[in-house]
Amino acid sequence: MTRTTGDHEGISLTEVVAFLDDILQTATTPDYQNALNGLQLTNSGSITRIAVAVDFSTEVVDAVVTAEANFLLVHHGMFWSGLQPFVGGYYSRLRSLLNADVAVYASHLPLDRHGDFGNNVLLARTLGLNIQSGFAHFKDIPIGVQGSSDIETSILVDRVRTFSRKHGGDAIVAGRTSPEARTRRWGICTGAGASSDTLNEASREGIDTLIVGEGPHWTAVDAADRGVTIIYAGHYASETLGVYALGSELSRHFQVDCIRISAPTRL
């Protein structure tokens, strides 16, 4: 492994990609087609500074170039919207990356579900919740986490709200919202975690409090009918922890600088 020793030397892109592919189980974790997990854009083969961000966007690309980083790790990658011609903003972002020799690596569900660096595990720990098992299955693989507790739901809401505001969002509560409510069984699924599948699984598991990033309007109505509290922490906020933690691990393992790019969507 070549270490950073100046402006011209760096670590091997191949080594970093192999490291990420291995610890994230990139090749064997199912995902949505447009996630396209793994290396999405190569560079000349050397990395001198890493940047991490939740989303791939013009704001993020500009920040990466300004910071003179040449490896970008994101949760939502370059092709999230599906097939797009390289015109307008799509062309401008690609041109900026190529001119600055920036490689891009994306990890969606592999990062969400990871036992050490995953968004769900880290959010549970941040909220002071003890994890007991997996939750929110996608093709038979648990992406989220769940566990037991005995805490006033209002206290848990305050913790989520504090976390969300720290990361540029805010928490919204729906469903079972009585002041006397207690959370005895909780489930977490970050990002777009509120869905019919997740709510049905929560009912089967006896979950009374569901913490997600976001969800359709009808999920708030359905939660009330089920007697479940849903805390919407914000899609962006709920998925900041994974890329930050993984970036820190890359920095430690390869002894290379890592910067965190904050670009909240407020959603």
Image (cartoon, rainbow, N blue to C red):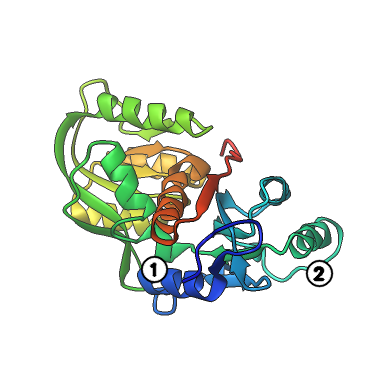
**Residue shown at 67%/68% (left/top)?**
82
Give the secondary structure at mark 1.
Answer: helix
The kind of residue on which mark 2 rests is Pro
Q: Quadrant of residue 76?
A: bottom right
Left or right: 262 as drawn, with respect to 94: left
Q: Is residue 172 at least partly visible in the picture?
A: yes
Please report contact status of discs 2 and 1: CB closer than 8 Å, yes or no.
no
Image coordinates for residue 218, horizontal then vertical, percent: 47, 45
The answer to whether residue 168 is above or below residue 111 is above
Number of on-image labels: 2
**Residue shown at 39%/60% (left/top)?**
253
Disc 2 to disc 1, how far (Cα)?
30 Å
Q: Nearer the viewer, residue 125 or 149?
A: 125
Q: Nearer the viewer, residue 22 or 183?
A: 22
Q: Nearer the viewer, residue 63 or 189?
A: 63
User: Which label was assigned to residue 99?
Assistant: none
User: Which label was assigned to residue 24?
Assistant: 1
Image coordinates for residue 258, horizontal then vertical, percent: 52, 50
Left or right: 138 as drawn, with respect to 33: left
| Residue at the extreme top | 179
For mark 2, what is the residue?
85
**Residue shown at 31%/72% (left/top)?**
140
The answer to whether residue 250 is above or below residue 171 is below
The kind of residue on which mark 1 rests is Leu
| Residue at the extreme front | 5
| Residue at the extreme right | 88
Q: Mark 2 vs mark 1: which is more N-terminal? A: 1
